[in-house]
Amino acid sequence: MKKTTLLLAAFAVVSCNERNESSIQYGEPQEIETKTYEQLEKVNWLVGAWGNTTPEGNLTETWSQANDSTLTCKTVFMSGNDTLFTETIEIVQVNDNLLYNTKVSNQNQGKAVSFKASDITDKQIVFENPKHDFPQKITYNKISADSLVAEISGRKDGKESKESYPMKKK
């Protein structure tokens, strides 16, 4: 009797293992959910080095893809050998929203200020933060594959103000 019970138990274990293996090998395909970052993909035309030289100095913005959900940028404005302004930026997709987080040298005690995308097309991105002192709006307009205009705007000292920064791809 013990031999029969032992044989039945061994048969049951082997049968279970074979069923599990066959269900793995021949079962229905499992769908793997992949996260897409469609909003960020619309603005990947920013990636690259951009710049403009004016009588006041040389402006550069260098954008790169940090990971699937983030673009990063280093902005530098120089006059001769003097660095007048630096800024680090990241555009991050969180769920279906794009956030533009910026840290400007010697401003806001080194803390980032966040702007939320209000309009995203293949040729324009608009970020807004109505509670920020200035700017309240940051816009990037793609003019061509090698040309863009960055613009900051909003109320400054009680008046509407706008600054435009045309740039060419380097």
Image (tube, rainbow, N blue to C red):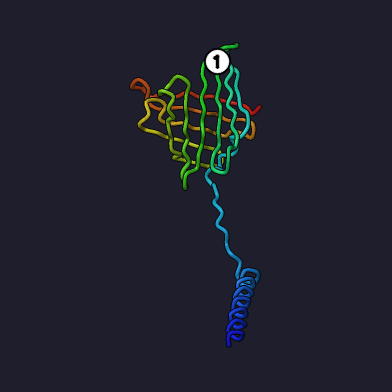
User: Viewed as shown, does residue 57 lie left or right of 136?
Assistant: right
112 shown above or below 119: above
Identified at 60% across, 76% down, the residue is 13
Residue topped by disc 1: 83
Relative to the observer, which residue lies in front, 123 or 31?
31
Residue that protrudes farthest toward the bottom in the picture: 1
Q: Could you tell me how many numbered marks the image carries?
A: 1
100 shown above or below 106: below
120 shown above or below 8: above
Q: Secondary structure at mark 1?
A: strand
Image quarter where the N terminus lies is: bottom right
Residue that protrudes farthest toward the front in the picture: 2
Identified at 61% across, 30% down, the residue is 147
Where does residue 137 sit, x and y in percent of width and height? Answer: 43, 31
Mark 1 Cα shell of 10 Å, populated few (<14), some (14-19), many (≥20):
few
Image quarter where the C terminus lies is: top right
Where does residue 160 sit, x and y in percent of width and height? Answer: 38, 24
Relative to the observer, which residue lies in front, 126 or 108?
108
Identified at 59% across, 18% down, the residue is 58
Identified at 54% across, 47% down, the residue is 38
Q: Which kind of residue does numbered mark 1 sit on?
A: Thr
Residue that protrudes farthest toward the left in the picture: 158
Where does residue 14 sit, x and y in percent of width and height? Answer: 63, 76
18 shown above or below 67: below
Where does residue 92 sit, x and y in percent of width and height? Answer: 50, 39
